[in-house]
Image: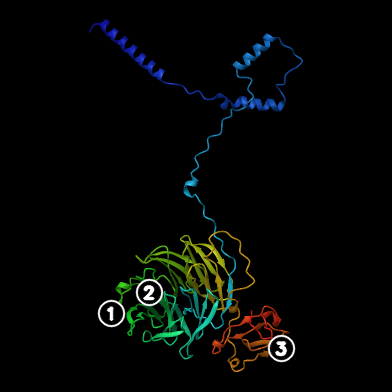
Amino acid sequence: MDVGLANSSYIQANRCIRRSSLNCRDDLDRFIPNRGAIDFDFAQYMLMKARRGEGKENLGVSSSPSSEAYRKQLAQALNLNRTRILSFRNKPSIPLQIDHLHETNPRRRRYIPQKSERTLQIPGIEDDYYFNSLDWGSKNVLAIALEDTVHLWDASNDDPRELVTVDEENGPVTSVKWAPDGLRIAVGLNNSDVQLWDSTANKLLKTLRGCHSSFVGALDWNNNDILTTGGMDGLIVNNDVRMRDHIVEIYRGHSEMVCGLRWSPSGRKLASGGSDNLLHIWDRSMASLNSQTQWLHRLQDHTVAVKALAWCPFQENLLASGGGLSDRCIKFWSTNTGACLNSVDTGSQVCSLLWNRNERELLSSHGSLQNQLTLWEYPSMVKIAERIEHTSRVLFMSQSPDGRIVASASADQTLKLWNVFGTSEVAKPTQKAAHEPFAQFNRIRCIMKDLEESPSTAVLDGEITGIRFGLASRDEISTSSISDCLISHPSQLSNPFLSLPLESGKCESCGTDEIGECEGHF
């Protein structure tokens, strides 16, 4: 190859390489930071200079205009006249606020009263964990069993009355349950019978016999016609109250007493709890009369009797159950799979459970040591409120038809009304009116039977113990130490039970007519 040609090619190649490197260098740019923001030496000098008091103008030294102009230009060129020690920057822009997208109207905290609305005396209530002696019907009538008698209280007009007193050999009354229509009520007895009563006419409609061999402690209605009973013999029986041969289906799975029964809102599943520590879920479609019905789920996580049962109103197939004294747990179950979703140790015997129909809340009643009512948030199971007023275990709870008021009955012989589910927003408790509705319940107790034979007043130790309504004049009454006035209405003389407190110690305060007859205005 010609040497000149080779040198020429080498020179052209070098030129191309140089051009490409120059082109690359032209494409690059060097980052020059803001020197004022990183000149920490100058910042330290300015801080120390201000502290030492340097830099003040020597007012006694004069300079020519040309020298002053030169000094200013030099200081400007060298950035010597800075008054800022470090550079300042604008605040960053506020980020976009999107909280309002999550909740336009934040929910207000619901006010829960600190105390019960009413306290009613109920002497004669049985202190038995396995009874179910309280129920609130759809017509706003509360039924409670006290020994051998079932009492009704119409909350709409504050009217108390007696439904039935069973014979002593058949009692006591062990369970009560209103039909969905709110007109008929089932009454379970200690002798294994179940009576069906018309509450409006005080008429016995039917007696169901042959279902059980011992007392009936649990009742629930599947609809207006199917009454389910659970007995001490461990049997669960579906009864069609329209039929003469009323036993239509039998569930066999418990070896001991059935103390809890609850049909699901759909009526397809039945939950049963027993003193054998078992919780069963039954499918109505699998029930039969002759063959042994197989349970859908047998749940054995509780360690003692299971009485408290409550189906969730807002989530289908969710069941809450509560265990007795040595268990103390509230458990949540999926009745589709039989899985235990959660378990909470409450620290005391769980006697009863109620769901709030409007909120995701569960109310539980308990035994010793505190005998409290506890409101839980679901599903976190954080305690929202705890109310302690009862002095003995709170055996029974029932909910008003509108879901606002809860009645709790305790072995301390009191029934309390709680507005625990009623108030929807923060509010101060209103002052009670001077006239207390339901005041006639404040002293419920039996009057001596000889009052029927002696309509005049019976005065013992200066205190009125009985008075026939409208037949005693104030002249017969010693007003020195009157504390209460026990009234026996003519229609209730067979078993009177009302005790009404006087407004004051003077008979005139209760109302008298022109001739001095007591009008009974209390």
Q: Tell me the crowding category of disc 2: few under 14, some 14 to 19, or many 20 or more residues within 10 angstroms, Cα based.
A: some
Whole-percent x, y for residue 489 in the image = 57, 86
Q: Which of the numbered marks, if any, corresponds to residue 256?
A: none
Decide: marks 2, 1 in contact (CB < 8 A)?
A: no
Considering only order in the chain, which callout, 1 or 2, is on the residue closer to the N terminus?
2
Considering only order in the chain, which callout, 3 or 1, is on the residue closer to the N terminus?
1
Q: Which residue is mark 1?
A: 291
Query: Residue at the front extreme?
Result: 514
Q: How is the image coloured?
A: rainbow
Amino acid bearing label 1: Ser
Amino acid bearing label 2: Asn
Q: Tell me the crowding category of disc 1: few under 14, some 14 to 19, or many 20 or more residues within 10 angstroms, Cα based.
A: few
- Is residue 279 among the parts visible in the rendering? no
Q: Which residue is mark 2?
A: 223
Question: Dividing the picture into quarters, in which one does residue 87 lie?
Answer: top right
Considering only order in the chain, which callout, 2 or 3, is on the residue closer to the N terminus?
2
Q: Quadrant of the C terminus?
A: bottom right
Q: Residue at left 50%, top 39%? A: 95
Whole-percent x, y for residue 418 in the image = 55, 69
Q: Is residue 481 left or right of residue 137?
A: right
Vertical placement of 72 versus 39: above or below? above
For label 1, the SS is loop
Q: Tell me the crowding category of disc 3: few under 14, some 14 to 19, or many 20 or more residues within 10 angstroms, Cα based.
A: few
Amino acid bearing label 3: Asp
Q: Is residue 128 left or right of residue 298?
A: right
Decide: marks 3, 2 in contact (CB < 8 A)?
A: no
Vertical placement of 424 versus 44: above or below? below
Whole-percent x, y for residue 472 in the image = 66, 88
Q: Which residue is mark 3?
A: 475
Whole-percent x, y for residue 352 in the image = 48, 72
For label 3, the SS is helix
Q: Nearer the viewer, residue 37 or 440?
A: 440
